[in-house]
Image (tube, helix red, strand yellow):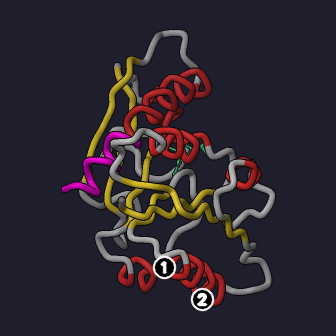
Amino acid sequence: RTRVGVLLSGRGSNMIALVEASRAANCPYEVVLVASDKPEAAGIAWAKAEGIATFALSPRGLGKPAFEAAIDRALRDAAVDVIALAGYMRLLSDGFVAAWRDRIVNIHPSLLPKYKGLETHARAIAAGDATGGCSVHLVTEELDGGVVLGQAEVPILPADDADALANRVLAAEHALYPRTLAEFVTR
Ligand code: GAR
């Protein structure tokens, strides 16, 4: 099975969806490490409680090169094949992306190429879009710019605020990410 390292910064609901899907006998990947730039992230506590290896390090006071070198070392020590970003809210440097070329995937809460970056749901509502959604894509040096591997679409309802839409999209993320990651590692 392909060895996946998940990077996250917070709640970790997408990481949980990946781990739960990986428990199916025929799943082609396993989550061997959950790493974070936020030692207090809820996702780190969940992974620990499940007995999954974790690595958490704040970049504060370290500087980006040393921080990324430590993350890179942890991923390599765990013999990670593919990195899955799951709510990882920090930009990876060009050097890190190049070192893991075509081996980093991300889930983004919009129908790319629409709404790269932050506040995706508020922007989709403000634009009057009839649908929103999420995308799993390869990570390149361009923010949210790599080739799209899979997408799921949900309706935007007249009463939606950004939180209501985010919740509907999040449910779609939890189905899309495990399926797309499984396809990606068996491509
Ligand atoms: C998810 O909605 C994910 O798509 C988004 O953050 C949330 C993380 O939730 N990612 C980004 O905005 C990346 N720029 P989770 O921690 O519960 O998986």
Q: Tell me what residue is drawn at x 75 percent, y 73 percent.
A: 58
Between 5 and 166, the residue placed more toward the observer is 5
Cα–Cα span, label 2 and label 1: 8 Å
Is tag 2's residue or tag 1's residue first in the polypeptide sequence?
A: 2
Q: Tell me what residue is drawn at x 73 percent, y 55 percent.
A: 48
Circle on res. 93: 1
Q: Is 34 placed above or below 79 here?
A: above
Amino acid at the residue labelled 2: Pro
Between 27 and 156, the residue placed more toward the observer is 27
- Secondary structure under tag 2 reads helix
Badge 2 crowding class, 10 Å Cα cut-off, few under 14, some 14 to 19, many 20 or more, is few
Circle on res. 70: none
- Secondary structure under tag 1 reads loop
Label 2 sits on residue:
65
The picture quadrant where one finds residue 22 is top left
Q: Tell me what residue is drawn at x 55 percent, y 30 percent.
A: 166
Q: Which residues are magenta?
A: 178-187
